[in-house]
Amino acid sequence: MRKKKLIDYKIFVPSLIIMIGISIPFALYEAESLELLNAIFDSIVNNFSWGYLWYGVILVVAGLYLSFSKYGQVVLGDPKEKPRFTLFEYASILIAMGVGSTIMRTGMLQWTSVANDPPAGVEAGSAEALLWGNAYSMFLWGFQVFAIFVMIAPAMGYILHVRKRPLMRISEACRVLFGDRFTDGIGGRFLDVLFLISILAGASVTLGLGAPIITQNLSHLFGIEVNFTLTITVTIIWVLLFSLSAYLGIERGIKRLSTWNMYIAGFFAVFILIGGPGVFILNYFSDSVSFLLSNYLNMSLNTDSVHQGEASHIQSNTVFWYAYSATWAMLHSVFAAKISRGRTIKEMILTYLLAPTLISWVATGVLGGLGVYRYLSGDLSVLNLVKENDRMAAIPDILSTLPFGELAIIIFMVVALIFLTTTLDSTTYTVAAYTSTRDMSKFEPPKLLRIIIAGIITGFALVLMRIGGLAPLEVISGLMGLPVIIIQFILIYAAKRMIDEDRAWSNNIR
């Protein structure tokens, strides 16, 4: 009997070759590459800001439509089957996957970028600029970005849990629209290769750019220099953690880490409120939410068309944020689909829209409020710190102002490290499931394949960290969002088409 291949080389090998072919030239000529890529990105900001802004809004509307129409009651799996996870476990996994360690960085420091470069007509460093800063940081983790993450999931969950298709792939979800010839031929392979390139690039960037969150805090604690040796040491420890978690799987690894982190993060928030300026943080949180809700439409759709100066941080960063989020959309949706067996489409979409948003707003309120208080009280010149030094170095400076400052830094690193781990173990698991030849409607991806994928992502990131090239790859990741956006809308329609064909809104409900 012929032994089945562990991995589908037809999509994995081309993805790897293209990644290497893209990255090496950009790494060798990093400055020139960044200049070229940033020029392309600036052109996109100037010409298509409006398109990206409407894209986020349209996806939120599409998510609400699927949730509250007849399609929302469709169960992803057997209607008699209980959901695989409790609601708390399910939400914790989606939060860990959705926000990752990035919330630790943006929650603490994003307000500084806006306060230093506020919207037109607002004075830098003013009270209004500080409100814009924290409100915008919350906006980044609002409904649009999580709609971007989840809206491919209904199609992927349907083919996996209802139609029981063996391959958990974007191409498979498109079969209902483009037919067997396209799906099984070069067209389907192109879609699957695009998925892998976007995820491998994003994972490498996350691994490379996530390390400073830990190294800068270690440097502050022990008075050591941040160099490549420290970075690679932290990275290897981190790799061992997410490789082990991915190896253990969703039940024993990813789920446990995600739920533990919710408890630790909750304890950390209470610690900051009690040990720090708790009353100010709660007041500032209320002001930030009020300011956000009052200006939500403005942040969602304003392009500053009548202000002819350079684009402010909000204008340019929102476009990049949506574009970069789009490259992760396929990964988030495929993973969400995998863990949503037994959930309705409404439960899946609304949990992803609401749970990460709520946690992100609380994290931003607590972490951002602490930083703003230190700035206003004169304890730290935070706005100058982020201009003059490595931005990440401001984080331990802010945390050290708390009672038991060293303990606060340690807890921050633990939470960040677990968030980083849960992001990349989910990524490793999903890529393994995507490239596996095993029937994903019945089985988990092979453990050996998960370790191989983790090794490839790690090796790629370490090489780029050593020779340069992560910064260009980050911009490329943002640019790759353009084709992904088209695929998103195709798959939203594919989900509707499959459900209508099967009359699942009548046959597959509780």
Image: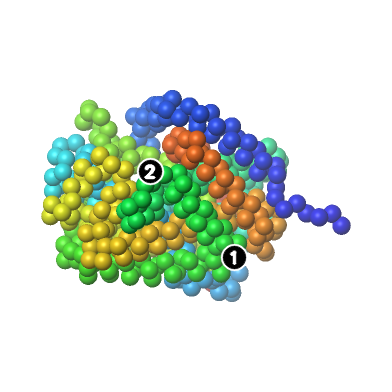
Instruction: State the separation of the CA atoms marked 2 and 1.
Output: 32 Å
Q: Residue at x 52, y 60 (%)?
A: 241
User: Is residue 114 rendered to the left or right of residue 197?
Assistant: left
Q: Nearer the viewer, residue 142 or 25?
A: 25
Residue 505 point in image, percent of width and height: 54, 62
Snapshot colouring: rainbow
Say which quadrant the C terminus sits in.
bottom right
Looking at the image, which residue sits at the far right? Answer: 1
Q: Amino acid at mark 1?
A: Leu
Q: Amino acid at mark 2?
A: Trp
Q: Position of residue 300 (x, y in %)?
A: 30, 45
- Is the residue 409 above or below the residue 88 in the image? above
> At x 15% / y 37%, what residue is drawn?
121
Residue 401 visible in this rendered orientation of the protein: yes
Q: Which residue is mark 1?
A: 248
Mark 2 and mark 1 lie on one chain; the one further toward the N terminus is: 1
Q: Residues within 10 Å of mark 1 (few under 14, many from 20)?
A: some
| Residue 152 in sight in this render | no
Q: Which mark is residue 149?
A: none
Residue 91, by quadrant, is: bottom left
Q: Element type at marker 2?
A: helix
The picture places residue 40, in percent across and down from the top left corner, at: 42, 28
Which residue in the protein does label 2 denote? Answer: 321
